[in-house]
Amino acid sequence: MKPIINRRDAKQIVSKHGDDFEATMEELAFAVGAQDIGANITTVEPGKAAFPIHHHYANEEHFYVLSGHGKVRIGNDVWSIEPGDYIFSQPGGPEHAHQMVNTGDEPLVYLAISTKKVPEVVGYPDSDKTGVRISYDMENPDSRFLISDDAKNKVTYWDGEDGAQVRATLKDG
């Protein structure tokens, strides 16, 4: 396997839900055979977030903003982000939950890098869900096992994600 990939040759994965969540990811690491580290270039259109706010108990994530402007939510804090900013999200509880929202007028584009430890437990504070990941399938986020916090109901990835916090972040922008 060739250990080099050009962005223009990367497989694109589109994720969309409702009016508030939309992203295109260009898969880099998997295409060159990486097994322990994931990397992709994520593009988020104005007024959108790529994913619900979430936190990882096992994995850390790193982000480098290539272009565009937005806000990053980490725990209860919100910071403006712009090209050249490097963001680190450490593993842990809800105080480390993170989400980037495009508050600008052009696409927000960032390089996302993460460890890929499994099993992984992921919390979703806005929708009170907990997910358990036993493998990595970026094309099918519903392949994860998700349960509600009361542990009685199995739910899908997007259940309870109404985008209210994305809209609130945009409004405060």
Image: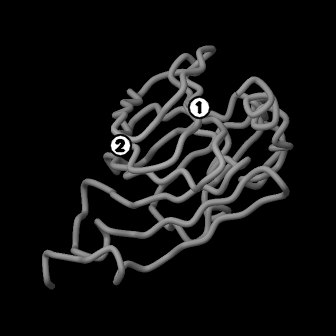
> Residue at position x 59%, y 15% from top?
77
Residue assigned mark 1:
71
Which of 146/18 is in front? 18
Circles 2 and 1, Cβ within 8 Å, touching? The answer is no
Which of 140/111 is in front? 111
> Residue at position x 46%, y 31% from top?
57
Horizontal side of 127 relative to 114 (left or right) equals: right
**x then y, percent, for residue 30:** 31, 70
Secondary element at tag 1: strand
> Residue at position x 36%, y 30% from top?
88
Q: Quadrant of the N terminus?
A: bottom left
Report the number of discs: 2
The kind of residue tagged 1 is Lys
**x then y, percent, for residue 80:** 54, 26
Secondary element at tag 2: strand
First of labels 2, 1 by sequence position = 2
Hey, which quadrant is residue 98 in on the image?
A: top right
- Residue 16 sits above or below residue 61 on the image: below
Horizontal side of 2 relative to 115 (left or right) equals: left
Circle on res. 18: none
Horizontal side of 104 relative to 108 (left or right) equals: right
Which of 92/171 is in front? 171
How would you rate the neighbour count of disc 2 (Cα within 10 Å): few for under 14, some for 14-19, many for 20 or more? some
- Residue 5 sits above or below residue 120 on the image: below
3D distance between C-alphas at marks 2 and 1? 13 Å
**x then y, percent, for residue 70:** 58, 37
Residue assigned mark 2:
64
The kind of residue tagged 2 is Tyr
Q: Quadrant of the C terminus?
A: top right
